[in-house]
Each structure stands twice: as structure tokens, then as C-alpha cells.
Amino acid sequence: MQNIDELINKTDPAWPLVLKWIDSARNKVEILPCDSSRAKDALFNTQVSTYSTLGAVIYNSGGIMIDNGWIRILGSGDSRLNRSVPEWNKGKTIKEYGDKPDYLLVADDAVGGFFAINYGAFGSDLKNIYYLAPNSLKWEPLGAGYSEFVRFCFDSDLSQFYKGLRWSTWNQFIANLDGNKSYSFRPYLWSPEGIDIEKCTRKLVATEDLFKFNLNKQKELNSSSSSE
């Protein structure tokens, strides 16, 4: 494991570039404050340099909220998004800090979608972002690395990306949403007959529970489809 001084890049850190992207962002972007000691712990436990965009976000933010918190990009944790990248991955993609994961969870959204960096779990396109879509329960490639994903969050038409997953009054519910909670829907968004989001009932649940539930359902669906 590299020590914290080796991970903090003083000559060419990525954060100034991230701030430039935020200055010109088309979507609403909010940087959550970070505690310096917590930021150092998170950076050390993730073992990434601040030369990288991922390291810069972890070390310089408690997380980044997009569209009032519809998307939550994980950093080093804050009261409104009380989980860091390494804390969130421990017990899911790694057993202990310093382990090399097959994929790394780096962001999620209010409707139970999860974004992860591929380190071999999903295919040969290493370091590209995949999205565990709540309406398919499949890891879908975004064809972008982490930096491009951050810029996608800042600048892309999210209403198009989330077509069919945003109900008409969604923005009235998101602004005060706890970053550790997500919406669960009935009927399930991945129901084979298809759903109308406007007719679904919504319930706030712990994002942790929803992730585990989605993975379990994904295994069930995969096993049932492979046995057909």
C-alpha cells in the first residue's frame, strides 16, 4: 500500500480540472464539503492518486450531487452522503482495504441505479464505467472511463438518459433526499411486462439494502433465464 504522501499529487492534481468542468456544467452540480482527516483516510484506503479524477474527487469532496442529488458521486463522505468510496465498497467488492476489486462502486442514483468502474468483472474494457440499471438489473456499459462519466453527469441530457425512470414530480422529492436512501418501486421497474413510472408506488429504502436486493434479484433472473 502506498502511503498518503505518495498518493497526494502536488505537481499535477486533477481537482483544478474538475472545478473547471463544474464551472461550465449544464446540470446542477453541488460539491459536498469534506473533512481533511476523513479525506486522507478515504484516499489511502482506496489507494488512488489525486493525479486521477477519482482520487481528486475522493480527496477534495465529501461527494458530488448532480441534479439536486438525483445522482450521487461518492467522495470521502459528508452528513448528506455519509459513505466514502472505500467504506461503500467494503463488504461488497472488497473484503479489506487494499484489496483489488473486480469492480468498484463509485456513484448511484435516486432510483436504485449503481455506477461502477470495471476491473475485469464485466468484460475486457477495463476502467470503463458500467451502470446497473434498475429497469433491467443488468450491468450496462457506458463506453466511458471515470473522467468521461463525471463529465457526462455534469453536461449530458440526464432526462434522456433516465427516460422512463423519472416521474413527473421527481424534482420535488429529490432536494431533501438523504444520500444513503433510494426509491424502491412497485411493481418492480424490471418487471418483464414493462411499467409506467407514473403508476408505480414509491418507497424510500436504504441504498445499502436496495443494492443487495437488486444483486439477489439479478442472480435469480439470470439463473431462471439460463435454465429455460
Image: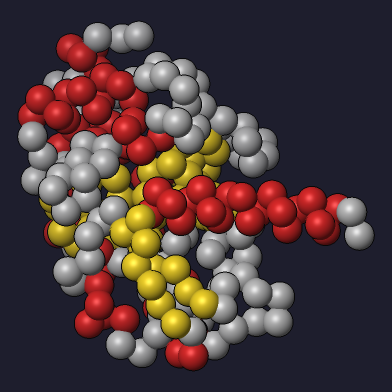
Number of disc labels:
0
Residue 210 as seen in the image, left or right of residue 87: right
Image quadrant where one finds the N terminus: top left
Residue 53 image offset from top left, x and y in percent? 30, 38
Closest to the observer: 156 or 72? 72
Looking at the picture, the colour scheme in use is secondary structure
Residue shown at 24% from the left, 28% from the top: 42
Residue 207 as seen in the image, left or right of residue 33: right
Residue shown at 53% from the left, 64% from the top: 134
Image quadrant where one finds the C terminus: bottom right
Closest to the observer: 170 or 156? 170
- The image quadrant that residue 40 belongs to is top left
Residue shown at 20% from the left, 41% from the top: 77
Residue 206 image offset from top left, x and y in percent? 35, 55
Residue 223 as seen in the image, left or right of residue 148: right
- The image quadrant that residue 46 belongs to is top left
Residue 207 image offset from top left, x and y in percent? 38, 54
The answer to whether any part of residue 9 appears in the image is no
The answer to whether any part of residue 58 appears in the image is yes
Residue 66 image offset from top left, x and y in percent? 26, 63
